[in-house]
Amino acid sequence: MTARNSKGSDLYCANDSETIFFGVQSKGLSKRDPVGLGGNLDNLRSDWWIITIKAKTDAPVCYVLTLDEVKALCHRSDPAKSSNGKASMWLQPTAYDRPEFREAWHRFGTVVFPEIVEGE
């Protein structure tokens, strides 16, 4: 467990031989809302992101994205429209709620652990 809004990954994963490690950032939402990414994309660290909507229901939906995808798909707010005059980054629902990311757990094996696919 991690503290709410703590920096860094929420979960660390490894292959069976513990030769490959990667961090996962988890965002749980009650509904299909934007995901706040802070003011600087350079502060994002986790290799993988899992965005869960309907997180506290019996029917949660998860979206699995890489850090590069999160950065490429983010939206930058207009600092002039912000109460503090600073820009912030957001991942809009239309960016993460896509068929290629929805319940795409298989992506962990094909990208991170290619030996799983080769050894099937």
Image (spheres, rainbow, N blue to C red):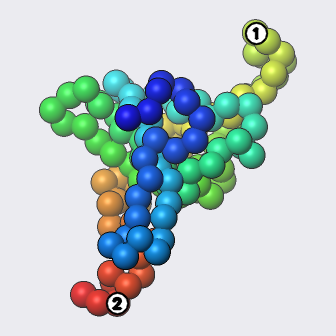
Three-letter residue code for mark 1: Ser
Q: Of marks 2 and 1, which one's residue comes earlier in the chain?
A: 1
Q: Position of residue 72 (x, y in %)?
A: 66, 53
Q: Position of residue 41 (x, y in %)?
A: 72, 43
Helix, strand or loop under label 2: helix
Q: Is residue 38 above or below residue 17?
A: above
Residue on which the image places disc 1 = 83
Residue on which the image places disc 2 = 118
Three-letter residue code for mark 2: Glu
The quadrant the N terminus occupies is: top left
Q: Is residue 103 left or right of residue 49?
A: left
Residue 71 appears in view: yes
Q: Mark 2 or 1, which is nearer the eye? A: 2
Helix, strand or loop under label 1: loop
Tell me what residue is drawn at x 62 percent, y 58 percent: 68
Q: Position of residue 111 (x, y in %)?
A: 46, 73
Q: Residues within 10 Å of mark 1 (few under 14, many from 20)?
A: few
Residue 98 appears in view: no
Q: Is residue 1 left or right of residue 56?
A: right
**In this view, which residue lies farthest toward the front?**
18
Q: Is residue 78 above or below residue 95?
A: above
The quadrant the C terminus occupies is: bottom left
Image quadrant where residue 80 sits: top right
Cβ atoms at labels 2 and 1 below 8 Å apart: no
Q: Which mark is residue 25?
A: none
Alpha carbon separation for disc pair 2 and 1:
52 Å
Q: Residues within 10 Å of mark 2 (few under 14, many from 20)?
A: few
Tell me what residue is drawn at x 33 percent, y 72 percent: 16
Tell me what residue is drawn at x 47 percent, y 27 percent: 3
- Is 116 in front, or is 84? 116
- Say how many tags the image has: 2
Q: Is residue 15 above or below residue 26?
A: below
